[in-house]
Amino acid sequence: MREISGLVILSWLAACASEPPAPEVTLARALINEPVTFDTIPKLGTLTITAGTDTIPRTFVDFSVGAVDPSAWFEVQSGTPTLSLWALDPNDTDLSGTNSIRVRATFPTIGPGVSSSATLAAIGEDGATLAAAQDDLQVFVTSLVPVANTNFARATGTLIGTICRTGDTEADTQACVPLSGEFDTSVGVQN
């Protein structure tokens, strides 16, 4: 745990080192059992979160090996346009999801706009939620530009709200700081 603006927030707020360009993951590499790691998987874009006074960079990746499987999607789920973002910590070399950030937001349409509802969770080891955004979270998609002849688009946007450490004590629920962020990434798009 670390101290942020007088509040104990999360150990996942550590800044990440910049990453070198990664070689392309191909079906051939997967078939020869070459390990797929953060260093070898294609990067799609970035999410930068500011929680209190700390900046947390995270990266969207493409898990695809012979199929489309990005960590960022804008699709209709149960009749509702939904943006699903899973941004990984560049230090998570085995892609376990530790210290990742998950955002899910619903919109009136697939395209630029303001979310109708949104959630954000900071994920720790074993998938435990370390912190979560409050009901004031809003996600804004400022642009969504289709990539010709693909199921992808380039999405940019911002988010704003409050994030609180999760836990069972009153101190946990009071450990809250302002949250803002921006993303710029390729997203899979399915209407």
Image: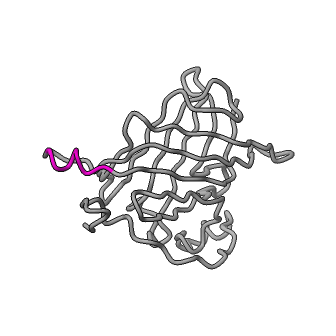
Q: Is residue 171 magenta?
A: yes
Which residue is at a point 86% across and 46% down the rendered structure image?
148
For this rendering, which residue is in front, 147 or 181?
Answer: 181
| Residue 16 percent location from the top left of the image | 48, 73
Q: Is residue 172 toward the left or the right of residue 41 in the image?
A: left
Q: Residue furthest top?
A: 79
| Residue 165 percent location from the top left of the image | 28, 51
| Residue 44 percent location from the top left of the image | 66, 59
Residue 114 sits above or below residue 133 on the image: above
Q: Is residue 78 magenta?
A: no
For this rendering, which residue is in front, 99 or 158?
Answer: 158
Residue 81 sits above or below residue 151 on the image: above
Q: Which residues are magenta?
A: 170-176
| Residue 115 percent location from the top left of the image | 56, 32
Q: Toward which corner of the image does residue 76 lie, by quadrant?
A: top right
Which residue is at a point 20% across and 49% down the rendered structure image?
172
